[in-house]
Image (spheres, grey):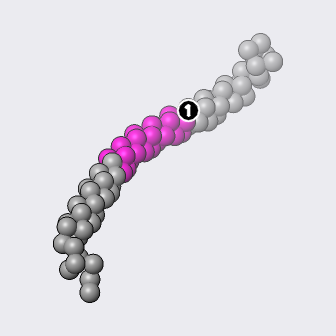
Amino acid sequence: MAPGALNPQSSVVADANELKDLQSWLKEVEGAESLMTELEAKAESLEAKVDALLADMERIEQEKSSNGSIETEEKNKFCAYGSSKYK
């Protein structure tokens, strides 16, 4: 025979304990979901910041390369005339 058949109160206690365990587990899951949502938001924010930094670095590199080519052209022009700026 099943233990619950002899003592119906023991199955009620077991069900109450299982319910309590289940509620506790559900709270943990909800907490984990909340943490995951927060983590995803922070990851998206970080990704946006990294993208912005990379875009700035690209812009700076493009400016350097275009300034470098302009300076090289100026240097070539003025070296022939003895400019002290490029000696």
Task: Decide if residue 10 is on the left or right side of residue 78.
Answer: left
Task: Decide if residue 71 is on the left or right side of residue 15.
Answer: right
- Compared to residue 8, the image places residue 63 above or below, namely above
The picture places residue 65, in percent across and down from the top left corner, at 61, 36
Q: Nearer the viewer, residue 15 or 82?
A: 15
Q: Residue at x 69, y 30 (%)?
A: 72
Instruction: Judge whether residue 64 is colored magenta.
Output: no
Disc 1 residue type (three-letter): Ile
At mark 1, the secondary structure is: helix
Q: Is residue 48 visible?
A: no
Q: Nearer the viewer, residue 11 or 19?
A: 11
- In which quadrant of the rendered view does residue 4 lie? bottom left
Task: Decide if residue 43 is on the left or right side of residue 14.
Answer: right
The picture places residue 78, in percent across and down from the top left corner, at 72, 21
As drawn, the residue found furthest toward the right would be 87
Give the residue at mark 1: 60
- In which quadrant of the rendered view does residue 74 lie? top right
- In which quadrant of the rendered view does residue 45 lie? top left
Span of residues in magenta = 32-59
The picture places residue 31, in percent across and down from the top left corner, at 33, 48
